[in-house]
Image (tube, grey):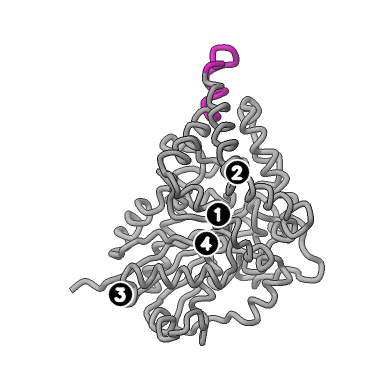
Amino acid sequence: MMKRRQIYLVPGFLGFSNIGGLNYFQGVRKVLSEALARQGVEAEIIECRTKPTASIRHRAERLVDEVCKNGGLEAEELHFVGHSTGGLDARLLCTPSVRLHTDTHIERDIVARTRSVITMATPHFGTPLASFFMTVLGRQLLEAIAALATSRSGQMGILGTAQLVGLTQGARELIGRDRTRFLDTVSKKFVSLTTESGEDMWAYFREIASDQGAMVQLMPEAMHLFNAAVTDYQTIRYSSLVAISPPPLTGYNATDLLSPVRIALAAVFILLHNTTASEHRHYPYPNPAEEVLASYEEALPYLLNSRSNDGIVPTLSQVYGRVIDIVVADHLDVVGHFKRNDFPQGDWLPSGSHYDRAHFEKTWDGVAEEIMLASDG
């Protein structure tokens, strides 16, 4: 009889499983299933719900609930693939002697069945971006967003703005059809999410407003304590998929300058990248072993140092356990949010990485191979 094997896809900070027709792991289930089949591995792939900005402990508790709800305590093998903060959730759950619930045998049963923890673009040693959001300006920004999204007047204002932006479709004849296609698609998508998905969208915003504990925990100085307390379980294979994006402006081409929306999003990415490039002077990232990086540095088109990042997480902060690969991609590329024909509105971080379908499949081929190597067969 075929062994029952489950793979849990754990979303990161601000993450969700799906809202309306929008998935956090966009297209991953299909690509990973095909990659596993090529490795001769059969598994049930589960996209987890999470608490978007809650503390790592609260998120790990939700992960335990997801495993129990999906019959993970009856499975022979469990594998966790965590993107961004999701990788920290999985590490906390799988640390020796962890206590997340009063009934601690649940954690022990989960760990006993777990064969691998695979992290993708995860801030194992923190990110300066979290430090920014702990400033007065950063906290005011989050509080303003939360207030808008959780009040009735704010909800109507957000929805009305999205609908107003959608009216730009009528101006296509004046400024060119291709120039507004992205903007029109995004506005229509948002309107459909806030109406067709009903309470899901606003419930998501309410969770953000109610618990923002992860923000302080993702600061480099806080992750220093996290790593002292959260250790590896000897029977579990730990590995990481690492992302590095082009330094600002180096990856863009002339066509990127033709769309006002892409210019605006690129400006946001540049701000994020520059903020993330500021290493904390008292909590530097560990230098990975030379043999780990030697095979990648020559192949990478950009310098790999403390300033390197994917727009959200420093590249050196992502290295943990065995390195599966270091890919030229931004933080969201690796979970399917890149520009492509079947998802044209998905490139929320236009970094100039030129990450495409072939890169996406190669990324998840590496994850599938890692699961195969960790599996009992």
Q: Tag 3 or tag 1, which sits nearer the N-term?
A: 3
The residue tagged 3 is: 75
Residue at 33% over, 77% down? 73
**Which element is circle 1 on?**
helix
Label 1: how many Cα within 10 Å (few below 14, some 14–19, many 20+): some
Answer whether labels 3 and 4 touch (C-beta < 8 Å).
Answer: no
Label 4: how many Cα within 10 Å (few below 14, some 14–19, many 20+): many
**Which element is circle 2 on?**
loop
- Looking at the rendering, the stretch of residues picked out in magenta corresponds to 170-183
**Residue found farthest to the left:** 1
The residue tagged 4 is: 51
Residue depth check, mark 1 versus mark 4: number of the one nearer the observer: 1
Label 3: how many Cα within 10 Å (few below 14, some 14–19, many 20+): some
Q: CA distance from mark 4 to mark 2?
A: 22 Å
Quarter of the rendering occupied by the N terminus: bottom left
Residue at 53% over, 16% down? 170
Magenta segment, prevailing SS (helix, strand or loop): helix
Q: CA distance from mark 3 to mark 4?
A: 24 Å
**Which element is circle 3 on?**
loop
Label 2: how many Cα within 10 Å (few below 14, some 14–19, many 20+): many
The residue tagged 1 is: 206
* Visible residue check, residue 325: no
